[in-house]
Amino acid sequence: MVTDLSQVVDLDLCLRHWSDARPQSTALVVGQKKISWRELNARINKIANAFVSARIQPDQRIAILGRNSLDYALLFLGVSRAGLCIVPLSSLASPNNLLGMLKDSNAQLLFVSQTYADMLIPIGDDLNTLLPYGIKNLDYEGDGRESLESFARCASEDNVVIPYSDDWGFNLIYSSGTTGTPKGILHDRRFRARERQTLQNLGVAKGCRTLVSTALYSNTTLFMFLATLGNGGTAFIMEKFSTQEFLKISESERISHVVLVPVQYERLLKDPQFDRFDLSSFQLKFSTSAPLHMQTKEAILKRWPAGGLFEIYGMTEGGVGCFLLAHERPDKLDTVGQPAPGCDLKIISETGRVLPQGEVGEVIGRYDNMMRGYVNQEDATKEASWFDKEGRRYHKSGDIGWLDDEGFLHLLDRKKDMIISGGFNVYAIDLERVLLAHTDIEDVAVVAAPSEQWGETPVAFVIVKEGIIIDPEYVREWANKQLGKAQRISEIRIIDSLPRSPIGKILKRKLRDLL
């Protein structure tokens, strides 16, 4: 039995430890279903033993296309216990992308929720990389397929004895597709073990009560969910996010930790009953996946002070990472924080030259916990890599920014989204900050439109606050008075909502398609 969890220890060994140390304590809660550590251990043993009986070899891959549920969580952990690699697929993927990810991953089996079973109809005849009878139902019986329950029904509850290798894949996550083409990002078991240890040092420890409110196929969700269980806490899984349900669970269950994406914070703050709930139990609130607007950070610190606010800037690929303890540094809310412990962060020019403090360039970084490369995509891995004189690989983020004299990172734009107008670099964030300062504007995204005169020119897509009617030309003139000549916005378009990825990133490529 593992006793020292302050070291880098495989996640599954940690789960076994807590099943012995806290057998009667609650490990998982999904809706009205509660599972103790003892029951959790038995159920994931059955799933793991079922994979062993099916002769699925360690380090092979099992795909899952499902909604947040108890079955999803059990399958995920059972796959890990069997020494296999989980491939969590986005339920928002197109049929072609879904097929591409399944083929690229070389998954042996696919478990699918009833909610998403119809997604397989257009591609069913092409799923020839799976094993025979390789499609299984995750949470229901029918369609002539074996369910997870029947798959594991006759398997043993005894512990699976597998000598794990740290180099085996833990999960293969496909990028959210903000570029249009998902890439496979492989995390090995060592990656997740180190991540669990890092979060333990941040207070995600024994007895914590974490509310999981984003999709389990996202790394945004997984890093907190897995660390909570690995460190002996209780994970409360929301099947679907709603502000009222989130607030009710947070108050009644005395939630201590949460990770939310910016759009969720914004929706919670807009809920008319937000201030009526007791949220004093929170010890730490995380934000990640996209930068938080400075105004949103200020509102969180004022209206939801319990637990402070810990913003994480990073990538599923690893390498680049910054932490901002917003409650400790309210003077730095316009940044995403300082490099995370162990992260070597640099700013480089277009030619790959390392730039000094204060100069603007692409953000790159490296640390021990980073992917080895994109699966089956050597060219994409090479394009995303930068090597120093010692031959050490850094990951290129694709973000443009600069470091101030305290080492805080100021983000300006995505490299591919930067606007070059009349030969000048225009950063969308500068224009968006000006527009967001207007009292009638709720949200905004600025993109480049083709221009015969300037090459490119900024166009702003604006969401106004509820009940407000505003003249776009007035907004344009108001903003341009505060901007430099090269920054001036050529058009304001009022829209109802901004296109976003499943974890809340604004999809600017879809906005450019509207131009």
Image (cartoon, helix red, strand yellow):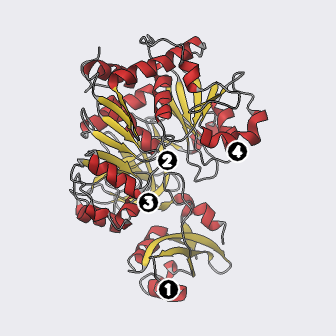
**Residue 507 appearing in the image:** yes
Q: Residue tagged by mark 2?
A: 396
Which three-letter amino acid code belongs to the residue tagged 2? Lys
From mark 2 to mark 1, how far is it between C-alphas?
Answer: 40 Å
Which three-letter amino acid code belongs to the residue tagged 4? Pro
From mark 4 to mark 3, how far is it between C-alphas?
Answer: 26 Å
The quadrant in which the C terminus is found is: bottom right
Q: Residue tagged by mark 1?
A: 470
In-image side of 51 versus 33 (left or right): right
Q: Earlier in the sequence, mark 4 or mark 1?
A: 4
Q: Earlier in the sequence, mark 4 or mark 3?
A: 4
In the image, which is nearer the foreground, mark 2 or mark 4? 4
**Quadrant of the rendered image containing residue 139:** top right
Give the answer, above or below, for where 215 lies relative to 432.
above
From mark 2 to mark 4, how far is it between C-alphas?
Answer: 30 Å
Q: Residue tagged by mark 3?
A: 263
Whole-percent x and y of residue 510? 62, 62
Q: Residue tagged by mark 4?
A: 95
Secondary element at image label 3: helix
